[in-house]
Each structure stands twice: as C-alpha cells, then as structure tokens.
Amino acid sequence: MNAREASLSVLKGLRGAGFEAVFAGGCVRDMLMQREPSDYDVATSAKPEEVMALFDRTVTVGRQFGVVIVVVDGIRVEVATFRSDGPYSDGRRPDYVRFTDREGDVRRRDFTVNGLLYDPIADEVIDLVEGRSDIAAGLIRAIGEPQERFEEDRLRLLRAARFAAKLEFAVEAETRGAIQADPGRIKSVSAERVAEELRKMLTDVNRSRAVRLMDELGLLEQVLPEVAAMKGVEQGKTHHPEGDVFEHTLLCLEQLEQPSFELAFATLLHDVGKPPTAEIIDRTIFARHAAVGEDIARKICRRLKLSREETGRITWLVRSHMRFRDVRQMRQSTLKRLLAEPYIDDLSRLIRADILGSHGDLGDYEWALARKEEFEESGEEVKPLLSGHDLMAMGLEPGPHFKDLLHALVDAQLEGKVTDRAQAETFVREWTSGGAHAE
C-alpha cells in the first residue's frame, strides 16, 4: 500500500461513516501540476474524537487544532477537521479554532495554490479561491488579504519564497508588496521553524532560486545577514570570472545534486568569511577566510539552533573547503589523513561545486579523487604500532606531548618510513631526542 492508497482508504472510511472528506492542500496542487505528491492530507467534517473513534490506530499531534494522524499499514495519514482560526496573538498559532465547513477551512489557508480540495470519488477539483488559475499563471498569491495572512503566521513570509522557488512561480504583486513592506517580521518566528524552512529550501533542486528570492523580498538580510553581506564583494577575475561572492555562491548551489541539508548549507556559507577578510592590495585577497568563515558559520548554526552533529559537519566543511588547493604538494601522510576524513565525500562535492561555480578547472579535484580511489583499493588501514602504554613502558613521562608523538608516528607509518615495532621504538627515541621531528 502506498501513501495515496492509505489516504484514500481513510477518506472512504470517513465517507462511509457519513462524514464529508476530501484531499486538501499541496497534494491537490501537485496532482494538477502532474507531480507526484509526497503525501495526501485529508480534510473532513468529522471532529477529532470522531476520527479517533472510527480508526484503530491514531496519534493525536494537534487535537486542539483539529489534527489527528491515522496509521494505515504503517503509513501516517494526516486528517484535519474543517476549521476556521481565531486571532493569532503570537504570529504563529491561532489562539483558538472553530470547527466549520470546507469553505471556511479553505479561507484560512496561506496561498491559493495550497487552498484546493479534491474529491477522488467524484474525481472533482473544488476550487473556492481561484487556485487553478494561479497555477496556470504561475503565481503564488495569498488567500484574501495578504497582510492578514502574514500576521497570522509570519513563517508564511519565508514559505512564499520557498513555494515560488520550488514551483518556479512568481510571487503575485500584492503578496510580494506585503512581504517587502515589513520583512523584519520574520525575526519573531522561532529559530527552529526558520531552520526547517531553510532545510526544505536548500534540499530542493531550486535552492539557488530560493535564496535569490529571499534576497529580492528582503528576507535574506533578516534571516542570514552574513550571506546578504556577500553582495557586491568583488573577487579576482582570473579565478572568479562569474562575479561577486554572492553570485558565485548561488552558482555553487546550482552545481549540487541531491545534497543533504548540511552539504547545501555549508555550500551557502563556504565563503561567508570573505566579506570581513576582504583586502585590496594589487587585487582583492581574502586571507584566512576559511577559518573566519568557520567561526561565522558556527554562530549562524547556533542562532538557528541546529543540532551539534549538523553544526560540526557544516563548520568542518566551511573550514576545509580550500584544502584541495595544495593536494599535489601535500606529504603522503597528510593527504591520506585528509582523504580518510569522515565527511570527505561531502567535502569533495562542495569543492567540485566551488570550482564549477568559478574558474571550472577540476584538475586538482580529479587528482585528489584518483588518489582516494587508489588508497581505498589498496585496503591499507594504518593502526598505530605503539600506544600510550607502550610509551610509558619505554620510560617516557605521560603528558600532552604523547598525542603529538603518536600523531607523528602514524604520519611516519603512512609515509612508509616506519613499518614495524622496532622501527617505531627507534622513531620514538629519535623524536624525543629532537631528531625525528626536527625536519
């Protein structure tokens, strides 16, 4: 059973019990656009307790707002009671809801393209807000008065940009004007909800278009001012014929194929350190921009309340995005360590996008990937020949220098200079006397 079949079975169950039930929202829009919906939401006249009494497995996720999840063969189907909303004191959720009819339910939704209903039994689209004509015209239009819709839930400011980018639509003039009139309202939305919209934007194929739309609507400066600061920061024409840092970043985003959120966000932020480090001598240089960018990216991740794992991956990618530049000159131990890093596949994809978004010379990138393949095919896995306990058995006093010594020993193993325990012990004696690490 697939998502449509599960939702249809729920809809038929509601109909059989005497309730009105239809498909609602994005699934109807996607069907009309001949796209495969990711899920099928059901809207009904049945109240939450009636839905829960009708089906064996239900989960209450928003019962006070009329939403119940019905589980069919392991597939979760969202069922929402027709409702109209009371005032939104917090700009996020209604203070209360009233259960109503299908027209009242449609009128409280965000955009006309998301306000369509579909009766699969009669094979009839129910359009009370001229959503079909806006789909045909390629427009994202607020239902009713735009300012009212945005005051109800200010996250809709970002959702307008996301839907317009995702569907390759334009934002209708009055709706656009309502956003541009006060984009700062987005700051009142919780960091977690903003981050979730960014996840959806940046993992969509039209991620570059979404960022540009955020900028045009005045939202980028509010949500990611560090990215907006890239505009107008010029770069050297030799390596960056494409234009300023902002245009380069958008081109990089376009080069990604089905990225994770972490990779896409790191690509968006990879040059975030350039504006504060820009210095003009005979040309514009950005000394230490990767290290500075790492610090800025960490602050952004914390501001958006991303997880520790997400933050760690994103900041490492930003810090490391220049590391293929010198791969041909690296010591073999350094190169092997780099190519064995946990996030090396994401780093490779970021570096490829960075190159294709600028000068296009993939020579160093392809050379590094060829070395990576060689190392993997060799099956070589270097384990330290000595441990900290072995060092103490040799009479060395434990301390912070043990970490540096063991790191140097592994480097020597990676380079083939040390191959057995006896050579490792000789290396340690030379290292502690100042010989092995003096070069």
Image (tube, rainbow, N blue to C red):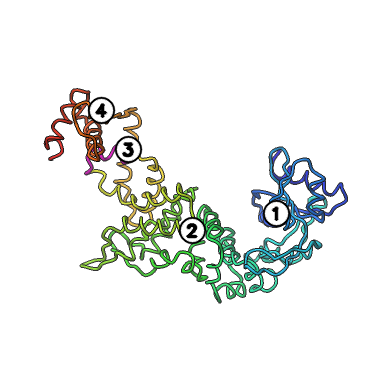
- The x and y percentages for residue 371 are 30, 37
Earlier residue among tags 3 and 1: 1
Query: What range is drawn magenta here?
Result: 329-339
Label 2 SS: loop
How busy is the neighbourhood of tag 2: few (under 14 within 10 Å), some, or many (20 plus)?
Answer: many
In percent of the image, x 27 and y 28: which residue is there? Answer: 389
Q: Which residue, given by chain and number where applicable, does mark 3 sit on?
A: 370
Q: Amino acid at mark 4?
A: Leu
In the drawing, what numbered circle is on residue 386?
4
Q: At numbered mark 1, what does the secondary structure look like: helix, strand or loop?
A: strand
| Numbered badge on residue 304 | 2
* Residue drawn where x is 66% and y is 52% of the image: 34
Residue 30 lies in the magenta-colored region: no
Q: Amino acid at mark 3?
A: Ala
- C-alpha span from label 1 to label 2: 24 Å
Q: In terms of secondary structure, where does tag 3 sit?
A: helix
Magenta stretch holds residue 330: yes
Task: Evaluate if marks 4 and 2 touch, with contact meaning CB atoms under 8 Å apart.
Answer: no
Q: Is residue 395 left or right of residue 114?
A: left
Of the 4 image quadrants, the one containing the C terminus is top left
